[in-house]
């Protein structure tokens, strides 16, 4: 119920969770007492019965539609996410939560990538997947989709964080990709309850969750004003490794806006060329990396071409 209360921040919801053993105790407290806990005046007066009923309705919907939720106070809550400045009070999910013992890599970027960036996103995600590392991204068109597809091809569970309820897959053209993520043993996650539609406000907020779940974050390609750069800022605030992908010169350079990632590199973000760069930085030794996949370049090349065609077709069908 606390997660649904309007007019308070994510941090303040955590404060309330820590202040009451049971949510029902909120019914018994005055507004003045709650303001004392939060150390500020509230701009809204809550009807606790209304939000209790909303919480019960959401719980019923989740049970009926195979959706789950985990609160910040629950031991199953992702531990890295718990450590950020403003963790969600509740995470809704379909599938299985990430293994807390395994590090994940965040990969994000523009919805309109260059062919080189598409290839780089897919290859890095595929390469770390072959070494048992899962990628977390936002299920958006472009870099996100290519990273998800490459990682799934590498044989590991995938994880996607939405800027909507987990029953509102956006873009709709990625519903099949979302199903593949669930079939892989991964999860679709969101801090928003079922029925919440995506908006320009929800996407920036979800980016802190992508970086929060990740050990390190790669911005593959991004223009100067990009949601991926919001993820970059969250990663830095959270003390995560922030990297950019190396994209060589080509005839496409003038057609795509890379000023965001170029600025990150100029400001000191390290450049990642292959999955081996990541394994080195994570101190994963050669003996732990497994054997190279036979026919790697051939198989990956075919997958990249197929998925680039699929991604372009998806983009042309989407309204934004």
Image (cartoon, rainbow, N blue to C red):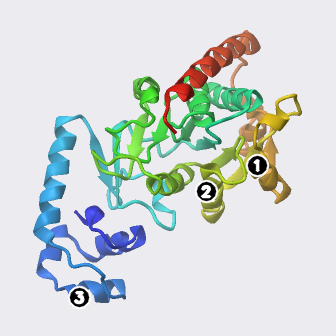
Q: Which image quadrant is residue 124 in?
A: top right
Distance Cα–Cα, label 2 vs label 3: 36 Å
Mark 3, residue position: 33
Q: Using residue 121 as the reference point, say whether residue 59 is left or right of it.
A: left
Query: Foreground residue, 212 or 9?
Result: 9
Q: Earlier in the sequence, mark 2 or mark 3?
A: 3
Query: Rounded to the nearest whole Å, what is the CA distance between mark 1 and mark 3?
Result: 47 Å
Asked if residue 297 can be seen in this view, the reply is yes
Snapshot quadrant of residue 302: top right
For the residue pair 308 and 61, the one nearer the viewer reads as: 308
The residue positioned 40% from the left and 25% from the top of the image is 179
As drawn, 228 above or below 39: above
Q: Is mark 1 on a helix, strand or loop?
A: helix
Mark 2 or 3: in front is 2
The residue singled out by tag 2 in the image is: 230
Question: What residue is shown at x 36% (from left), y 60% (from top)?
Answer: 72
Label 2 and label 1: CA atoms lie apart by 12 Å
Which numbered dot is residue 261? Answer: 1
């Amino acid at each position: 119920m606390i997660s649904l209360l309007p007019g308070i921040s994510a941090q303040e919801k955590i404060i309330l969770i820590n202040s009451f053993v049971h949510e029902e105790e909120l019914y018994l407290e005055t507004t003045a007492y709650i303001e004392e806990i939060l150390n500020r005046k509230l701009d809204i007066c809550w009807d606790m019965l209304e939000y209790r009923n909303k919480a019960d309705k959401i719980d019923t919907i989740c049970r009926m539609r195979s959706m789950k939720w985990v609160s910040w106070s629950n031991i199953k809550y992702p531990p890295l996410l718990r450590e950020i400045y403003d963790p969600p009070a509740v995470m809704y999910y379909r599938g299985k939560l990430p293994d807390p013992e395994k590090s994940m890599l965040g990969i994000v970027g523009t919805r309109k990538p260059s062919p080189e960036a598409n290839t780089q996103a897919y290859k890095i995600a595929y390469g770390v997947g072959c070494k048992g590392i899962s990628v977390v991204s936002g299920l958006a068109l472009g870099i996100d989709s290519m990273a998800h597809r490459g990682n799934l091809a590498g044989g590991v569970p995938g994880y996607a964080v939405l800027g909507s309820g987990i029953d509102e897959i956006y873009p709709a053209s990625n519903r099949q990709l979302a199903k593949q993520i669930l079939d892989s043993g991964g999860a679709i996650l969101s801090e928003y309850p079922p029925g919440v539609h995506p908006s320009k406000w929800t996407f920036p907020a979800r980016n802190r969750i992508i970086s929060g779940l990740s050990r390190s974050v790669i911005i593959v390609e991004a223009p100067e004003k990009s949601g991926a750069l919001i993820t970059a800022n969250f990663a830095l605030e959270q003390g995560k490794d922030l990297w950019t992908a190396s994209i060589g010169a080509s005839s496409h350079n003038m057609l795509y806006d890379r000023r965001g990632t170029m600025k990150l590199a100029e400001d000191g973000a390290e450049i990642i060329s292959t999955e081996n760069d990541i394994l080195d930085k994570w101190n994963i030794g050669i003996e732990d990396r497994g054997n190279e996949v036979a026919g790697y370049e051939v198989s990956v090349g075919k997958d990249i071409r197929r998925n680039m065609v699929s991604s372009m077709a998806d983009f042309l069908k989407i309204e934004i």
